[in-house]
C-alpha cells in the first residue's frame, strides 16, 4: 500500500519533508491541492475523535498512512490485532453467558474449565464463519478491479476498524447492562463498513451489504451454539 491523501484518497509518494528534527513541511496532494495528511501534526486524541465520528479522512490516515509506517512490523501488528480481537470477542461471549446463567462460587474448577474451553471454541468457529462470509460477500458485492486491495488487506482493515471492542474493557471495572454489548456491536459494524468503503472505494450500500451479511452470520451462529 502507498501513502494516500486523506482528503481525496489520491496516491502520494511522501507525506512530509523533514529539514531537521522537529522541523517538517507537510506535502500537498497533486490532485486536490490540499495538505495530504494534516493528522501528522495533530494530537492522537483528535484522530480518535474523528474515527469515532466516522470521518473518511481519519480512516485513510489509519489504514494507509499509519500502516505504511508500520510495514517493518506488520507481522507483529497482525498477531496483536488478531489476539486482541479474539480476546475481546471471548470476553463478550463470557459476559453474555454469565448474564443468562447463574455462576456461583460453588462452581467446580472442571466446570469452569469446560465452560471457558467451550467459549474459546465457539469464538474461533464464529469468527471463522464471519471471515468466510465476509470474503465471499466482498466478491459478490464489491467490485474487485485490478489494483484492488488483497483479501489480506481487507481482513487487516476489519481487525483494526473493530477498535470499538476496546470499550468492552470498561465492563471489567463497571457494571453495565448486557444491552451495551449490542450497542458496541452496532458501532463495530458501522466502523467496519467505513473501513471497507475507504480501502475499496466501493459504494456505501455495497459495503453495508458485505459487512452486514458477515455480522449477521456471526450473530446467528452465536445464537445456535
Image (spheres, rainbow, N blue to C red):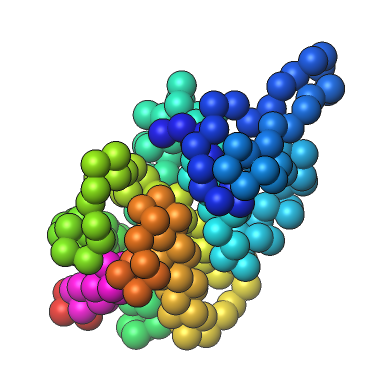
Residue 55 lies in quadrant:
bottom right
The spot of residue 149 in percent (x, y) is 31, 43
Report the side of 175 relative to 146 (left or right): right
The verdict on residue 219 being magenta is: yes
Judging depth in this view, the residue of 3 and 214 nearest the camera is 3
Q: Which residues are magenta?
A: 209-222
Residue 156 higher or lower than 52, as above or below: above
Residue 104 higher or lower than 38, as above or below: below
Quadrant in the picture for the C terminus: bottom left
Asked if one can make out residue 175 in the rendered structure from this viewpoint, the answer is yes
Judging depth in this view, the residue of 81 and 14 nearest the camera is 14
Name the residue at 61% across, 51% down.
7
Asked if one can make out residue 133 in the rendered structure from this viewpoint, the answer is no
The spot of residue 167 in percent (x, y) is 56, 65
Residue 180 higher or lower than 79, as above or below: below
The verdict on residue 148 being magenta is: no
The spot of residue 47 in percent (x, y) is 67, 52
Judging depth in this view, the residue of 66 and 94 nearest the camera is 66
Name the residue at 57% across, 43% down.
31
Amino acid at each position: 500500500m502507498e501513502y494516500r491523501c486523506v482528503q481525496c484518497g489520491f496516491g502520494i509518494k511522501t507525506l512530509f519533508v523533514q529539514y531537521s528534527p522537529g522541523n517538517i513541511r507537510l506535502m500537498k496532494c497533486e490532485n486536490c491541492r490540499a495538505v495530504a495528511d494534516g493528522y501528522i501534526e495533530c494530537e492522537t486524541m483528535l484522530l480518535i475523535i474523528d474515527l469515532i465520528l466516522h470521518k473518511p479522512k481519519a480512516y485513510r490516515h489509519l489504514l494507509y498512512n499509519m500502516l505504511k509506517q508500520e510495514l517493518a512490523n506488520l507481522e507483529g501488528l497482525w498477531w496483536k490485532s488478531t489476539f486482541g480481537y479474539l480476546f475481546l470477542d471471548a470476553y463478550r461471549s463470557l459476559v453474555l453467558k454469565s448474564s443468562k446463567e447463574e455462576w456461583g462460587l460453588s462452581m467446580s474448577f472442571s466446570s469452569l474449565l469446560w465452560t471457558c474451553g467451550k467459549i474459546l471454541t465457539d469464538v474461533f468457529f464464529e469468527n471463522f464463519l464471519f471471515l468466510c462470509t465476509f470474503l465471499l460477500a466482498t466478491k459478490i458485492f464489491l467490485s474487485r478491479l485490478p489494483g484492488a486491495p488483497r483479501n489480506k488487506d481487507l481482513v487487516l482493515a476489519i481487525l483494526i476498524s473493530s477498535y470499538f471492542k476496546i470499550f468492552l474493557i470498561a465492563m471489567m471495572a463497571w457494571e453495565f447492562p448486557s444491552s451495551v454489548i449490542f450497542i458496541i456491536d452496532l458501532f463495530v459494524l458501522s466502523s467496519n463498513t467505513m473501513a471497507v468503503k475507504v480501502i475499496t472505494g466501493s459504494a456505501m450500500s455495497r459495503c453495508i451489504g458485505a459487512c452486514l451479511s458477515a455480522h449477521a452470520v456471526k450473530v446467528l451462529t452465536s445464537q445456535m451454539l
